[in-house]
Amino acid sequence: MKFVQVNPDEIEALGSDSTRGGLIGPMIKSFLETGYYMVEIDCKEIGRKAASVSASVAAFSRNHILPVRPVLRGPRFFMQRRDVTKEGTPIPDWKDELLKIHVGLGDGSTPIEFEAVPLKSVGVKK
């Protein structure tokens, strides 16, 4: 392996969208501040594919327990709120319902028990 010395100043700095939540976090925050129930995001404008943005929004909202549901319909990407109805009525227990959806999170107070599954080992012939 060959190493070539480079000047760090000559390397292009990473964009803000390549760091944790640099693009997705502010986008979700802006969406929640609008008060809209559902919006469409023009992914070409941010230079990413709709499927990539959808996966990032899903992971970010799940990890931070945010009331945002990504919706992908072909090349179109939408974000939908889970804390209000279409009519704008607040859903008081949205967080409890969201935690039930994510397997393994529960309410945090009850340990989850799994049944042991017997494994078979199979010999491999050379």
Image (cartoon, rainbow, N blue to C red):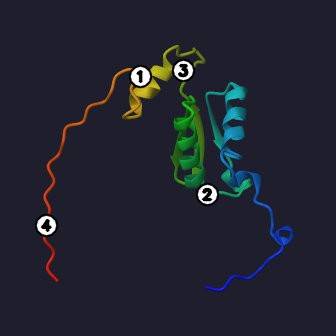
- Give the structural element (helix, strand or loop) at label 3: loop
Q: Which residue is mark 1?
A: 107
Of tags 4 and 3, which is closer to the observer? 4
Q: In the image, what residue type sits under mark 4?
A: Val
Compare residues 107 and 28 and report the one nearer the observer.
Answer: 107
Q: Is residue 105 above or below residue 59?
A: above
Which disc number belongs to residue 49?
2
Whole-number angstrom distance, CA of label 4 to CA of label 3: 52 Å
Which badge, 1 or 3, comes first in the chain's sequence?
3
Q: In the image, what residue type sits under mark 2?
A: Lys
Which badge, 1 or 2, comes first in the chain's sequence?
2
Q: Which residue is mark 4?
A: 122
Of tags 1 and 4, which is closer to the observer? 4
Q: Pick the quarter of the image with the N terminus.
A: bottom right
- Give the structural element (helix, strand or loop) at label 2: loop
Q: Are marks 1 and 3 in contact (CB under 8 Å)?
A: no
Q: In the image, what residue type sits under mark 1?
A: Asp
Left/right placement of residue 113 relative to residue 122 reads right
Whole-number angstrom distance, CA of label 1 to CA of label 4: 39 Å
Task: Tell me where residue 52 sits by quadrant.
Answer: bottom right
Counting from the top left corner in percent of width and height, residue 77 is at 59, 46
Q: Pick the quarter of the image with the C terminus.
A: bottom left
> What's the residue at 52%, 53% (across, down)?
74
- Give the structural element (helix, strand or loop) at label 4: loop
Compare residues 108 and 101 and report the one nearer the observer.
Answer: 108
